[in-house]
């Protein structure tokens, strides 16, 4: 019987280059490009498929990858966690080095760990932290930042938004804060933190792209787990308060209603980053 080792890898990716994390094509025999340098192969649609194809090539066996979260198209990550089993016997340092050499621009491995066979990056996680970046009163366009933060016209009242966020903390049924729900999935989540940080970028420069980001704000959201589009929905409803369109008590009223049709359209995906997954 072949003995396999399970490894966990921490990865970063630019979500604007992929159609989400979860594979879109059926899993079967990996469709490798027949010839040529793997660095020049066409980019796969999803991060999961890209990793599975390249790991299968390097380890010369069929590799299945599991992730800690199924981020949507356009959503980024600085600390997504994946896991896979291999019987190759190749040193993990070599696996990571070779994998980074053939992965496309915008996707890389930052660290690794050998884990027990019972470890699953999604089901073993205790909590997850997301950041959502928003540029209030932003110009109409940006050649550099339009794929990595929400450029929103108009100023926002951050204190009203912070006030509106307080009743959302704790364990609640967040049915009103998700658009698509899997019937077997529980809707109760424990929202542990929802902080709104302002002016997170500071610089003494007189010009340049970093100076533009001085007004940037960050929604830091932490929970044991999240429903589909939950973070983007939290941000969207709080922005309605910050813009003066809703009173501060409105997001809590929507939460109690459990009616998703009362929520604002979710915030765009490109401002969202998965930044931390916490394990025992």
Image: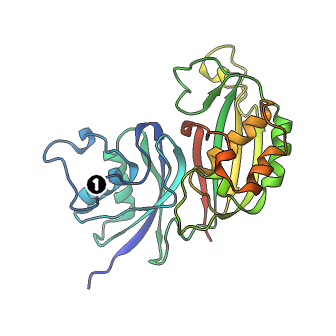
Q: Determine the residue positioned at 68% across, 58% down.
A: 174
Q: Name the residue under label 1.
A: 53
Q: In which quarter of the image is the C terminus?
A: bottom right
Q: Which of 223 and 112 lies nearest the eye of the viewer?
A: 223
Q: Residue furthest left?
A: 35
119 w.r.t. 149: above or below: below
8 sits to left or right of 200: left
Rendering coords of residue 190 (x, y %): 71, 63
Rendering coords of residue 230 (x, y %): 63, 51
Q: Crowding at label 1, few (<14), some or many (≥20) Cα neighbours within 10 Å?
A: many
The answer to whether one can see residue 10 in this image is yes
Q: Residue furthest top?
A: 206
Q: Determine the residue positioned at 83% across, 51% down.
A: 166
Rendering coords of residue 2 (x, y %): 27, 81
Q: Determine the residue positioned at 84% across, 41% down.
A: 248
Rendering coords of residue 59 (x, y %): 26, 62
């Amino acid at each position: 019987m072949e003995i396999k080792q399970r490894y966990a890898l921490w990865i970063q990716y630019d979500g604007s280059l992929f159609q989400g994390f979860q594979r879109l094509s059926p899993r079967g025999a990996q469709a490798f490009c027949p010839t040529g340098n793997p660095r020049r192969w066409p980019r796969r649609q999803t991060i999961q498929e890209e990793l599975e194809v390249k790991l299968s090539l390097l380890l010369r066996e069929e590799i299945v990858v599991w992730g800690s979260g199924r981020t949507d198209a356009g959503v980024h990550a600085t600390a997504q966690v994946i896991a896979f089993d291999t019987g190759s016997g190749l040193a993990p340092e070599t696996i990571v080095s070779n994998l980074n050499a053939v992965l496309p621009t915008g996707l890389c491995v930052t660290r690794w760990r050998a884990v027990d066979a019972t470890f699953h990056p999604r089901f073993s996680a205790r909590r997850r932290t997301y950041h959502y970046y928003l540029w209030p009163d932003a110009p109409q366009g940006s050649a550099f930042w339009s794929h990595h933060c929400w450029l929103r016209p108009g100023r926002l009242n951050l204190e009203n938004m912070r006030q509106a966020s307080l009743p959302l903390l704790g364990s609640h049924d967040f049915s009103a804060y998700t658009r698509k729900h899997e019937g077997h999935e529980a809707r109760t989540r424990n929202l542990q933190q929802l902080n709104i940080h302002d002016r997170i970028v500071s610089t003494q420069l007189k010009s340049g792209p970093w100076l533009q980001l001085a007004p940037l704000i960050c929604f830091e959201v932490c929970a044991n787990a999240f429903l589909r589009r939950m973070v983007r929905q939290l941000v969207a409803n709080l922005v309605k308060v910050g813009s003066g369109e809703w009173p501060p008590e409105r997001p809590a009223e929507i939460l109690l209603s459990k009616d998703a049709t009362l929520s604002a359209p979710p915030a765009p995906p490109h401002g969202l980053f998965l930044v931390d997954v916490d394990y025992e």
